[in-house]
């Protein structure tokens, strides 16, 4: 059975749904203790930084607690007593997951089940970060939250399983699907492409995969607003607008004034161990209906991030 969309999540608190008349969003809820898993990762760092502005944030890294150990996870969260948990921890190496499905399921499914059970036990809300890869990309238009999932690869399967655990085991939960992440503190397409454009005369980039690039700093701001809203359910959250990987690479080249030639090609010309969905566009219907501030365009976000990279190089 597919997980229910926001507005019909079984067991969730009444009155905390988009779809009816949305409640006005407060500027910030009273300070609360927030645990951020995967705090050493690219998104986790952005979430820690953003939430720490107005909350008591406890970063949780792998060295602090093995989330695949159910007892250790429950004991650690019990001792911390958070009001909210933002679960960013995941194994996101898509091709690596394909070659080691057992590890992928441990890291992305079983660990998430442990976090969901522990969150329910300590009466904390749980915000789970999921992915566009839960869909197969066959839909001709953007995916809405209630569309059936059908992962093409092991990574997407493991994250879809994680979604089901969260919705099944934690009453106050958010599942947030996002896509094409980039930002400070991690390996990502924008950083890699900027480096390649400086080092090569030509780069080939696939033009038949379409999605929405998402800046971790912008996503973190939206996650803060969502967690404080208590509008539990399933959400799609990305920067506004869509493009192919080729169009994204071309935008980066234009912003950098690069003379490197960006050449479009089909996915079949650059085979990878794990298949990717051709359409990763996520429609943020539930988030928009909640009345919360919408993210800006991906182009503006990419421009900002390229500025960050330029300042790093100048140091």
Image (spheres, grey):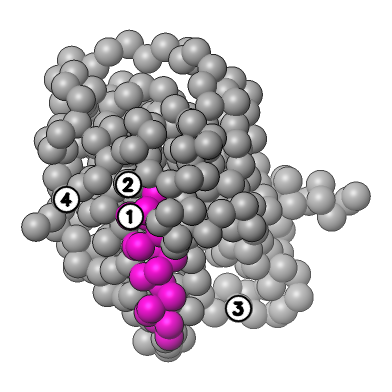
Q: Name the N-terminal-most of marks 1 and 4.
A: 4
Residue carrying label 3: 203
Q: CA distance from mark 4 to mark 3?
A: 40 Å
Q: Name the N-terminal-most of marks 2 and 3.
A: 2
Q: Which mark is nearer the camera, 4 or 3? A: 4
Label 1–label 2 contact, CB within 8 A: yes
Residue carrying label 4: 3
Q: Secondary structure at mark 1?
A: helix
Q: CA distance from mark 1 to mark 2?
A: 6 Å
Q: CA distance from mark 3 to mark 1?
A: 41 Å
Q: Which mark is residue 117?
A: 2
Q: Which mark is nearer the camera, 2 or 4? A: 2
Please say if 105 is above or below 300.
below
Residue carrying label 1: 113
Q: Name the N-terminal-most of marks 2 and 4.
A: 4
Q: CA distance from mark 1 to mark 4?
A: 15 Å
Q: Which mark is nearer the camera, 1 or 4? A: 1
Label 2–label 3 contact, CB within 8 A: no
Q: Which residues are magenta?
A: 98-115
């Amino acid at each position: 059975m597919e997980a229910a969309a926001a507005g019909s999540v079984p067991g969730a608190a009444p009155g905390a749904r988009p779809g009816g008349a949305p409640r006005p969003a407060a500027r910030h809820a009273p300070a609360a203790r927030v645990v951020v898993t995967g705090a050493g990762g690219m998104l986790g760092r952005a979430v820690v930084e953003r939430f720490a502005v107005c909350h008591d944030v406890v970063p949780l890294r792998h060295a602090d607690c093995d989330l695949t150990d159910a007892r250790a996870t429950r004991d650690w969260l019990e001792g911390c007593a958070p009001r909210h948990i933002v679960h960013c921890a995941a194994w996101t190496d898509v091709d690596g997951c394909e070659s080691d499905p057992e590890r992928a399921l441990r890291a992305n499914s079983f660990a998430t089940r442990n976090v969901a059970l522990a969150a329910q036990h300590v009466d904390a809300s749980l915000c789970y970060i999921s992915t566009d890869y839960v869909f197969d990309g066959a839909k001709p238009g953007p995916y809405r939250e209630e569309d059936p999932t059908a992962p093409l690869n092991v990574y997407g399967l493991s994250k879809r399983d994680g979604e089901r655990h969260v919705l099944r085991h934690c009453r106050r939960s958010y599942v947030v699907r996002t896509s094409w992440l980039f930002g400070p503190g991690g390996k990502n397409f924008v950083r890699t492409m900027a480096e390649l454009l400086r080092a090569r005369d030509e780069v080939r980039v696939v033009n038949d995969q379409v999605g929405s690039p998402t800046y971790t700093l912008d996503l973190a701001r939206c996650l803060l607003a969502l967690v404080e809203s208590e509008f539990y359910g399933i959400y799609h959250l990305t920067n506004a607008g869509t493009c192919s990987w080729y169009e994204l690479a071309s935008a980066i080249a234009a912003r950098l004034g690069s003379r490197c030639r960006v050449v479009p090609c089909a996915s079949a010309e650059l085979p990878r161990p794990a298949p990717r969905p051709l359409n990763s566009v996520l429609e943020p219907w539930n988030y928009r209906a909640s009345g919360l501030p919408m993210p800006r365009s991906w182009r503006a976000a990419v421009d900002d991030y390229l500025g960050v990279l330029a300042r790093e190089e100048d140091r």
